[in-house]
Image (cartoon, grey):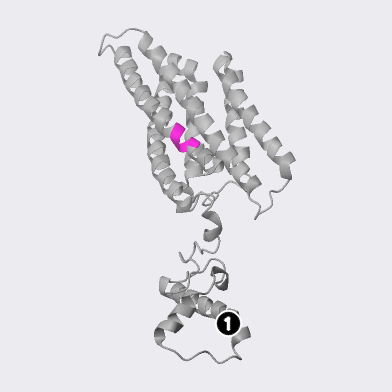
Amino acid sequence: MTPIDWLALLHPVLIILFVYPVVGATIRLGILARERRLKINPLPPSVGIEHGDHGRWLTGGVVVAVLIALDYSFIKHFLNQATPFAGGAARLGLLLVVSAGTLLAYLSLWFVKKAPLRASFALLTWAGLLGLGSQKEIWRLTDNPLTGEFWGSHYWAGVLLTGLLLFSVAARQEVLRSLRMRRLHVTANVLVAVLLAVVAITGTRDLLEIPPSWQAPALRGCDYTTLQCAPTISSEAFRQALDRAVKEALGKRLAPTALVAPPVGPADDAANQAAALPPAALAPGLVAPA
């Protein structure tokens, strides 16, 4: 695998090793926080604080994973010599700067206290992801929400998931103070759980469709509508072509001596003469048949 292939694995590896384990811990802590609030289970107040902290880390992990996936797509298309990257290195640098600004906006969301600032930085983070995702280098099934492909798109499921998580982080203080906001928070996170399942399924599907960089040129002739690729030569046809190439190479080598009658002798002499041919008589890369 090349370095760009390893870069492609960073997004799913981060999701598997960090995001999904933190999801389980966050859900568990949320259930315990609800039990404490309803006095079902006598638990310390730190349960609610840990639930909120886990939610922030979960959202941060998703934001970083999405940015890695987007930047990978930009870098891959920039390095691909077959299709020129619009805007060149200047546009690639601008996209990477926007990625860094999006991450900085999310980090700012952690520290601001006032509600307008929290809402602003959450929207800035989501807008940055949407702006980067709208570039033509980002593969999406469709952008029409009225079609089934839209709801089976890994990109759009991830974008909606990130938006709901950003809302939960930004509205943390309001969730603690308002029963209506708590109900909205629970409803939003039920949808988050559904989207996490959709992202896992569609991500696995898309990962199977991304070939290593050295295999990509062979797949350019494939038609993804008819699910057919250009026919390849069979092993039998390859052997026949190899035999013809060997015979042609031997014929060209023996052509200058064709005017001289070959000596008449037993079959062993002819075999010995063929075996005595120097290696240069064969075409480069070919082996004479036995």
Q: Is residue 209 above or below residue 241?
A: above
- Is 176 left, or right, of 126 in this rendering? left
Question: Which image quadrant for residue 37?
Answer: top left
Q: Quadrant of the C terminus?
A: bottom left
Residue 209: image location, x then y, percent:
46, 52
Residue 114: image location, x then y, percent:
58, 14
Q: Nearer the viewer, residue 180 or 106?
A: 106
Check disc 1 and report the residue beneath it. Answer: 254
Q: Is residue 123 visible?
A: yes
- Residue 84 forms part of the magenta stretch: no
Residue 115: image location, x then y, percent:
57, 17
Image point (59%, 38%), residue name:
71
Q: Is residue 261 above or below residue 136?
A: below
Q: Amino acid at mark 1?
A: Leu
Residue 192: image location, x then y, percent:
41, 33
Q: Nearer the viewer, residue 34 or 127?
A: 127
Query: Pointer 1: residues within 10 angstroms few (<14), some, or many (20+)?
Result: few
- Is 201 left, or right, of 111 in this rendering? left
- Is 216 left, or right, of 272 in this rendering? right
Image point (51%, 76%), residue name:
246
Q: Which residues are magenta?
A: 10-14
Q: Secondary structure at mark 1?
A: helix
Q: Nearer the viewer, residue 20 or 252?
A: 252
